[in-house]
């Protein structure tokens, strides 16, 4: 059985289809049609809802509520276990609209209204963040990056965001409501592994490993932002899923002086928070990974496990010589990200094996390190090309150069010849010219809807030059 709150109502589900989306549950099972379906693929935000979960719910820390916007069209209902789900119908209180809704009306933030419930929920998630007003005002564009509007235009919607955020209040009654919700969510967090014969949510690494080894044909579900597209776009049925999100070992977040260890079920939003501190040069790329709705669900393990040649984390991890811990049953093994990808959408994982965690060495302050994502749109778009470059320096000369790309081959790749040509010399214009020649020989990108082969080839070379120009003034990873 899974248990969650829909607004204040306790919902207990036993016999549900593993691939039932939150959107279909709301609209078809509960007749709550305020949440709209636009694209069914996570791209438009019309289906945005908010989940509330407990964080820091252990003996030492006081539990906090975490409000997150998610795309309900690509979220599975089984993943709601232990959380509160809020849809646009739930924002009114005592017959009064929420301040976000009032601001949308007063600032004329809606015309046809199809996108409006999604915008309202994204703004509500922002409104509920426990951060100072100034910080939230700076995050309006980020919060709306996953919502498309085709008729109103963004100016009035952003004006509504500012008005609502400026009138945020924290009353005693609200604080009491929060405490009540914390207690309700704590009472939901009963450990339950076998929810139905179709949806299993292991509570420990041993349970996960043993179950998946015995049922290697079931599908691992992390954030579902890739997996759900098989259901909503390819119309597949996914009859049997194993959800990895409740396994504490898969959620570890260790920050050490010279490396990070992150569990495979750590989300991209969490990565953004951790890496903004420890790998600041990766921040801009991570901010352009999907949208808030996508990053709140998408995980490291899902990004690597889908083995997409255009995934954005692999170039970063390749450039930093990251190592994966893979597990099958009780056996673990270490595999360099470099050796993980075998061919198009194929990895070295055996049946029943999964990614448990990743160890990411941090770039040294004096090394050249940069990540660049090129895509058609700034927000919520997949890379045409992604480059991560890491050039450790010793007395002004490059050692162990790493040039890692996404979007230029059947798998994420390193450009080994170009790397060699950069080693043992200063990273200057001449070195870049020679490396560019190597790049044009060794990378043979293809043309597709995102970019032509010629464009991709040109971009790989231009990005290298761009990094050299950025660092030529003595700029180092210290001040990127
Ligand atoms: C609108 C939208 C925008 C997106 N933007 C980007 C983007 O900018 N950059 C980008 O790189 N990607 C993007 N994606 C793709 C996707 O969000 C990412 O690949 C994400 O990291 C997948 O993680 P997940 O947890 O949602 O994976 P899931 O969908 O849960 O799983 C994906 C695959 O990995 C497998 N898997 C999951 N966990 C593990 C594990 N621990 N071990 C082994 N296999 C595992 C699953 O079985 C499945 O086959 C986007 C997707 C959408 C819908
Ligand atoms: S319907 Fe478009 S993101 Fe869900
Ligand atoms: S108001 Fe019509 S799409 Fe936004």
Image (cartoon, rainbow, N blue to C red):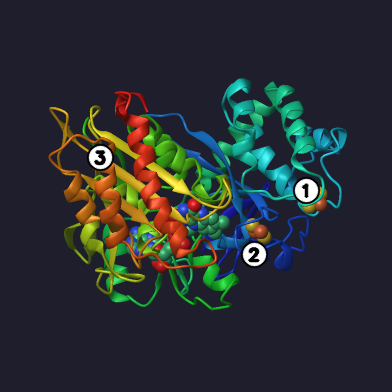
- Mark 2 to mark 1 CA distance (whole Å): 16 Å
Q: Are marks 2 and 3 in contact (CB under 8 Å)?
A: no
Residue at x-position 40% and y-position 33%: 276
Q: Secondary structure at mark 2?
A: loop
- Of the numbered discs 2 and 1, the one sitting upstream in the chain is 2
Q: Is residue 95 above or below residue 162?
A: below
Task: Report the side of 455 relative to 473 (left or right).
Answer: right
Q: Which mark is residue 116?
A: 1
Q: Is residue 405 above or below residue 305?
A: above
Say if residue 31 shows up in the picture: yes
The residue that label 3 is drawn on is: 430
Residue at x-position 64% and y-position 34%: 140
Q: Position of residue 340 (x, y in %)?
A: 25, 62
Q: Quadrant of the C terminus?
A: top left
Residue at x-position 75% and y-position 29%: 164
The residue that label 2 is drawn on is: 40
């Amino acid at each position: 059985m899974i248990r969650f709150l829909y607004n204040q109502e306790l919902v207990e589900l036993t016999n549900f289809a593993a691939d039932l989306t939150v959107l279909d549950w709301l609209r078809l099972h509960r007749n709550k049609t305020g949440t709209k379906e636009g694209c069914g693929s996570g791209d438009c935000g019309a289906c945005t809802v908010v989940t509330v979960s407990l964080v820091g719910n252990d003996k030492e820390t006081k539990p906090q509520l975490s409000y997150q916007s998610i795309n309900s069209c690509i979220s599975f209902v089984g993943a709601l276990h232990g959380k509160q789900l809020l849809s646009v119908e739930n924002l009114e209180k005592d017959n009064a609209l929420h301040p976000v809704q009032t601001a949308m009306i007063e600032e004329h933030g809606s015309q046809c209204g199809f996108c409006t419930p999604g915008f309202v929920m994204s703004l509500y998630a922002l409104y509920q963040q426990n951060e100072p007003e100034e910080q939230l005002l700076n995050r309006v564009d980020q919060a709306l990056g996953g919502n498309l509007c085709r008729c109103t235009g963004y100016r009035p919607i952003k004006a509504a965001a500012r008005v609502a955020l400026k009138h945020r209040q924290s009353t005693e009654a609200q604080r009491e409501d929060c405490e009540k919700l914390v207690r309700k969510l704590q009472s939901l967090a009963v450990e339950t592994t076998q929810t139905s014969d179709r949806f299993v949510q292991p509570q420990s690494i041993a349970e996960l490993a043993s179950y998946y080894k015995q049922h290697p044909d079931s599908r691992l579900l992390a954030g579902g932002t890739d997996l759900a597209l098989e259901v909503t776009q390819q119309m597949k049925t996914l009859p049997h899923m194993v959800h990895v999100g409740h396994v504490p070992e898969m959620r570890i977040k260790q920050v050490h002086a010279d490396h990070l260890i992150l569990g495979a079920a750590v989300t991209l939003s969490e990565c953004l928070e951790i890496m903004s501190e420890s790998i600041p040069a990766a921040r801009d790329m991570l901010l352009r990974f999907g949208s808030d709705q996508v990053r709140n669900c998408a995980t490291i393990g899902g990004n690597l496990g889908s083995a997409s040649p255009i995934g954005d984390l692999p170039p970063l991890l390749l450039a930093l010589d990251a190592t994966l811990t893979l597990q099958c049953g009780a056996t673990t093994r270490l595999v360099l990200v470099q050796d993980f990808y075998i061919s198009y959408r194929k990895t070295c994982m055996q049946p029943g094996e999964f990614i448990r965690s990743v160890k990411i060495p941090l770039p040294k302050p004096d090394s050249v390190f940069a990540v660049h994502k090129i895509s058609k749109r700034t927000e919520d778009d997949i890379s045409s090309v992604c480059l991560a470059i890491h050039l450790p320096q010793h007395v002004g000369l490059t050692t162990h150069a790493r040039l890692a790309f996404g979007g230029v081959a059947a798998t994420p790749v390193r450009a080994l010849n170009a790397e060699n040509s950069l080693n043992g010399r200063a990273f200057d214009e001449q070195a870049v010219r020679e490396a560019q020649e190597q790049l044009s020989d060794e990378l043979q990108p293809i043309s597709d809807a995102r970019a032509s082969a010629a464009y991709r080839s040109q971009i790989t070379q231009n990005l290298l030059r761009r990094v050299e120009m950025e660092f030529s003034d003595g700029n180092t990873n210290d001040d990127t």
